[in-house]
Structure formats: C-alpha cells, structure tokens
Image: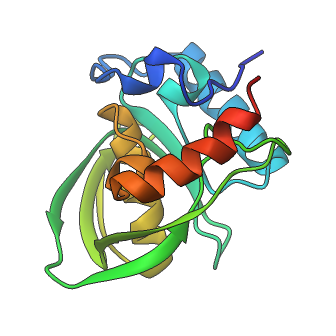
Amino acid sequence: MLQMKLCGDLILREKCSPVVDITPELLNTMDEMIEMMKSQSGVGLAAPQVGIVQRFLVMMNPDTNEIYRMINPQILSRSDETCVMEEGCLSVLGADNLPVYANVRRPKSVVVQWMDEHGNTKSAQMDGTIARIVQHETDHLDGVLFIDYLSGVKREMLMRKVNRGHK
C-alpha cells in the first residue's frame, strides 16, 4: 500500500533517477497511484510523492478524464507566453488535510515527450490546464514543489497554513 509523502519529507526534494525497465511492479504502482489520485480528487501524482525516487508520474486531464501514465517524461519546450493559475498539491496539505492553494505563473503550453506503459515513445503539445499539470508533476521529479515559485512572503503565509496541519 502506497503512502503519501507530505511537505517537509526530504524525499520530495530529491532528483529522481530514470526508469530503466518497465516491470509489472512499476505498472502496479502506477495503477495504485491512479486510484490514490482519484480517491483524493487530485489530477496528478508523481513517484516521489509516494516515496519512490524514479522518473514516472500519473495524471488526468480534468476536461476529458483521459489518464496519462508517463515514464521518464521530459518537457522539450515551453511557450514564452505565460499564465497564472491556482495550484495545489496532494503533498502540501493544510490543517483540514486538504491541499492549500496559491497562484503560480507558468508557461501556457509545453511540448512533452515520455514513454507509455508499453515502452512506446509519445509526445504531445499540451495547453492550458493539462500543460499546468504536467509541469507541476515533472517538477516533482526534480525535487521542485509549486511553493518554490512563490515570493518569500507568499510562501511563508502558505507554509503557516501547512505547518498547522503537522503539529
């Protein structure tokens, strides 16, 4: 049974290693992560969030409910145009055990390449919400959290909410 790692756990700050082999264990873990993501009303979950320091993630397009299983994802390009959207994270919870949210500026669209669960190389241009999700989740694979994009003052205010949940 996978367990969610929460803000403050050092594993969330580690840079993940590439996946070398697509094993039945990896596929089972990804299935379990999808169930976990859905049960917590999330739209993405990266391996370090469940304590695995490897480059894979699962995510869902909230507009179409399409599920992505991404192994060794890479963002190949980012648009110059940016937009601000609210972000939260299943690893950054408040006192009520629900994600805390903040506005984050990111590129509006990205081109992503990854391997699917069958070992096929895929790529897609993603725009809007789905582009936001893939950027947030691939950041996790590099030990970056959405709170890192906030100003010092905003991050401090948000972390006060988060810390209350872990006393």
Residue 71, quarter of picture: top left
Q: Name the image quarter holding the C terminus.
A: top right
* Residue 51: image location, x then y, percent: 55, 17
Which residue appears at 79% of the width and 49% of the height? Answer: 98
In the picture provided, is 43 more to the left or to the right than 22? right
Residue 11, quarter of picture: top left
Q: How is the image coloured?
A: rainbow
| Camera-nearest residue between 83 and 74 | 83
Asked if residue 112 is positioned above or below residue 30 in the image, the reply reads: below
Asked if residue 63 is positioned above or below residue 33 in the image, the reply reads: below
* Residue 36: image location, x then y, percent: 76, 37
Which residue appears at 31% of the width and 47% of the height? Answer: 114
Which residue appears at 38% of the width and 58% of the height? Answer: 150
In the picture provided, is 84 more to the left or to the right than 45? left
Total marks drawn?
0
In the picture provided, is 43 more to the left or to the right than 120? right
Asked if residue 20 is positioned above or below residue 56 in the image, the reply reads: above
* Residue 127: image location, x then y, percent: 37, 79
Q: Name the image quarter holding the N terminus.
A: top right
Q: Is residue 36 visible?
A: yes
* Residue 133: image location, x then y, percent: 47, 61
| Camera-nearest residue between 8 and 29 | 8
Which residue appears at 78% of the width and 55% of the height? Answer: 41
Q: Is residue 121 visible?
A: no
Asked if residue 95 is positioned above or below residue 59 in the image, the reply reads: above
